[in-house]
Image (tube, rainbow, N blue to C red):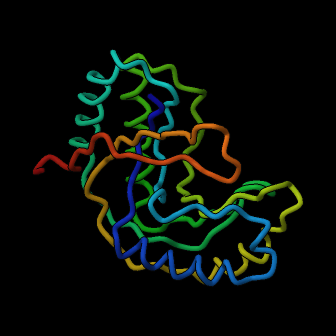
Amino acid sequence: MRLFAAVLPARAAVDELAAEVDLLRSLPGAGALRWTGREGWHFTLAFMGEVDDELVPELRTRLARAAHRTEPFPLRLHGGGRFGRRVLWTGAAGGLDEMRLLAERADAAARRSGVPMEEHRRYQAHLTIARGRTDAADLRPFVERLQEFEGTRWEVAELALVRSNLPGGGEAGRGPRYETVGSWPLGRAS
């Protein structure tokens, strides 16, 4: 199955972001973007790709340990940016050091479980909200609008293991469907 470790935003944060995305979708050029849905909004910590079923029990044990070793931390959605001409995202503020540490621990958990991980990159907290349908999409007006976006603080209290179900039949414009297949509370007292 196709898996990744993630932080899922609180419902109130999702509601705030949905209101902001509604405004973004009213800007000129919004039709050139494929907007992600609120049910799929997440901060990927460690993308594992296809994971053999026999590795999943050990992965779950190690992710639980990574969560247990990481204390809850504050986070809020904040600002935004782009990767190239194709990906529009909102960022995060608050406990970014703690989030990077949790990402490193999730990556290490996957590696120690036998999951072949791609080369390690410095973690950058981002939540994808749209993708350009082509390289011709101009994301600058959307990034400028996102600079003003400030979400309400919430406490990140768990680490999630999420399954990415890719759309079948090659349907144009459909993105993956996400399913949480495990979650573990952060911190020793949990």
**Residue drawn at x 28%, y 41% as measured from the top left:** 182
Q: Residue 137 sits in which quadrant?
A: bottom right
In the rendered image, the residue lying farthest to the left is 189
Toward the viewer: 146 or 108? 146
Question: Residue at the spot x=86%, y=55% of the render?
Answer: 135
Q: Is residue 145 left or right of residue 63?
A: right
Instruction: Answer with left or right where residue 1 lies relative to residue 55.
Output: right
Q: Residue furthest right?
A: 136
Q: 186 and 22: which one is in front?
A: 22
Q: Position of residue 35 (x, y in %)?
A: 64, 64
Q: Quadrant of the N terminus?
A: top left
Looking at the image, how many numbered discs can be counted on the residues?
0
The residue lying at 72 percent from left, 75 percent from top is 142
Coordinates of residue 33 in the picture (x, y in percent): 74, 64
Instruction: Tell me which residue sits at (23%, 34%) in the image.
Output: 65
In the depicted structure, whether residue 169 falls above or below residue 99? above
Q: Nearer the viewer, residue 154 or 23?
A: 23
Please, is residue 34 above or below residue 187 in the view? Answer: below
- Say if 42 sits above or below 121 in the image: below
Relative placement, left or right, of 147 versus 189 is: right
Task: Pinpoint residue 105: horizontal percent, then vertical percent.
Answer: 37, 36
